[in-house]
Amino acid sequence: MEIVRTELEGVYIIKNFIFNDNRGNLIKVYNRKTFDDFGISLEIKELYYTISKKCHKRNAFSIKAI
């Protein structure tokens, strides 16, 4: 995950971590340490979802919020 500052104060571009293999995809959309390093405070520690190739007719989401 990468966070890029923009010219606008408080506005960031967030580039999510994406992992692909033969089973499907994992996209991490939130990482507490990365956000903390940029001074962005949220209560979620981690948030991601997966899309399984096995469930190709529907999206299979797995969300972890601690």
Image: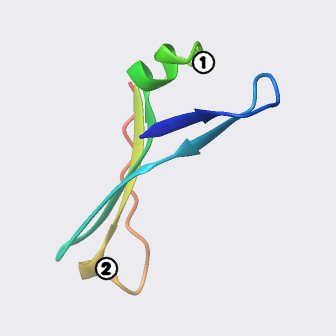
Label 2 crowd bin: few (<14), some (14–19), many (20+), radius 10 Å:
few
Determine the secondary structure under disc 2. helix
Residue that mark 1 sits on: 40
Q: Which of 30 and 66 is in front in this view?
A: 30
Task: Indicate the position of residue 39 as horizontal and vertical percent values.
Answer: 58, 12
Q: Which amino acid does label 1 sit on?
A: Ile
Residue at (35% x, 84% y) in the render: 56
Q: How far apart are marks 1 and 2 (CA)?
A: 35 Å
Task: Indicate the position of residue 7 as horizontal and vertical percent values.
Answer: 79, 31
Which residue lies most toward the left here? 22
Residue at (46% x, 48% y) in the render: 16
Determine the secondary structure under disc 1. loop
Q: What residue type is labelled 2?
A: Cys
Task: Indicate the position of residue 2 as horizontal and vertical percent values.
Answer: 46, 38
Q: Identify the disc placed on residue 55.
A: 2
- Residue 52 occupies which quadrant of the picture? bottom left
Which residue lies most toward the front here? 7
Question: Is 27 placed above or below 31 here?
Answer: below
Label 1 crowd bin: few (<14), some (14–19), many (20+), radius 10 Å:
few
User: In which quadrant of the rendered image does the N terminus lie?
Assistant: top left
Left or right of 11 on screen, residue 35: left
Which residue lies most toward the right here? 8
User: In which quadrant of the rendered image does the C terminus lie?
Assistant: top left
